[in-house]
Amino acid sequence: MVNSATIQEQKVWDVLANITDPEIPVLSILDLGIVRKVNIYNNSITVTITPTYSGCPAMDVIGSSIKMELLALGFIKVEVASVLSPAWTTDWMSKAGKEKLKAYGIAPPSNKPQVCSLELFAPNEAIQCPQCNSYHTHRISEFGSTACKALYKCDACKEVFDYFKCY
Amino acid sequence: MTDQIKYLLCLADNALILGHRNSEWCGHGPVLEQDIALTNISLDLIGQARNFYQYAASLSGADHNEDTLAYHRDSHEFLNTLLVEQPNGDWGVTILRQFLVSNYQYYLYQQLQHNSDVTLAAIAAKAIKEVTYHLRWSSEWVIRLGDGTTESNQRMQQALHLLWPFTYELLQPADYETGYIDVTKIKQLWQDKTNEILAEATLSIPNNSQPFIGGKTGAHSEHLTAILNEMQSLPRAYPNTIW
């Protein structure tokens, strides 16, 4: 038997699955792995999210989107809470999200769970070109168009591309 | 003001003022990729500052929020080190300062992420992921420029003479800091790393330099006033405006 609360919560998750990152519009906030918790109490709801990077300017926009969409769904009080711990990691990005990123032209974060090491002038990670799938790529810059990305160039097809770096 | 709030403001002010200084390079970097790198670092630092300010505001009890703390305090109320408020100088000075500060923040946040204050620990645990990138990037650039051409080496050596007197303050705890961190341990780690990178960059650490201190207790150089005049002008001209 499905009770009404469950149906409502499923509706909430459906709505959240359609809210996207304004800077990477192919990724939903669920793909990104930033929604940590949903608490429903009668007509009130609290959605707990965790920021990607400390300074990510998309977070404020995402918070407002969540509020607007859930008010539209019929909630009277919507709260978006932010939690820092445990710190977000690219390991929380969904498999579907990684595929969407690649199709969009951004190399997804490496599958191996890793953190940035302090090793200097290290050989580049083997990052696959999202255009031609070659691994003959090299890093142009540690930092790219947003805080979460690095800039790479493919030596095979010569295309420059963003890489969603490990965090 | 409690020591806890003072310490949070010191952490926040260091991050905000350095972030603001770095942001002055936006559109002026020597090459586009490194211009973008430095503005990305600014964004991380300003984000870390926001986290510290939000926490400080939640504890202060008074009518404070992150914006009042950043925009409505005067220079004598800021608790950042003198190092971060110094003018950017050339690219070499900016890079070297970023290395000296990132190196400090790296070991500082390593300790703070285990602090018994869970909110402070969470902010530090998050920041360390970002600071690791900053430290790697700035270390590589210090080496590349120091061990580069004759001119780049000279400029880096000049930058080191200029900035070295300000490093004492990073490692000299204010009264409100001592309860939070083991400064002796951070100092040792910072010195070892600094010596290693500067040696690889073929740069010599100046001796007999006179320490410049005071920022952490609110005694600032005239440069901070100039930063605040610019940074705070809009919120002060139009208080409570939201955009």
Image: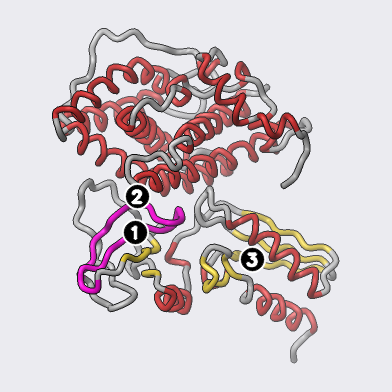
- According to the image, label 2 marks what residue? B33
Mark 3: give few (<14), some (14-19) or many (20+) Cα within 10 Å: few
Helix, strand or loop for disc 3: strand
| Relative vertical location of residue B166 with respect to residue B102 in this rendering, above or below | above
Is A154 a magenta residue? yes
- According to the image, label 1 marks what residue? A151
In terms of image quadrants, where is residue B67? Answer: top right
Residue mark closest to the camera, 3 vs 2: 2
Asked if the residues shown at circle 1 and circle 2 are in contact, with their CB atoms under 8 angstroms apart, the answer is yes
Residue at (20% x, 38% y) in the render: B144
Mark 2: give few (<14), some (14-19) or many (20+) Cα within 10 Å: some
Residue at (60% x, 64% y) in the render: A36
Residue at mark 1 to residue at mark 3: CA–CA distance: 33 Å
**Residue B181 percent coordinates (x, y):** 45, 29
Q: Which mark is residue B226?
A: none
**Residue B185 percent coordinates (x, y):** 34, 28
Residue at (42% x, 22% y) in the render: B83
Residue at mark 3 to residue at mark 2: CA–CA distance: 37 Å
**Residue B95 percent coordinates (x, y):** 33, 34
Asked if the residues shown at circle 3 and circle 2 are in contact, with their CB atoms under 8 angstroms apart, the answer is no
- Segment colored magenta: A136-157
**Residue A56 percent coordinates (x, y):** 54, 53
Q: Which mark is residue A37?
A: 3
Amino acid type assigned to the residue bearing label 3 in the image: Lys
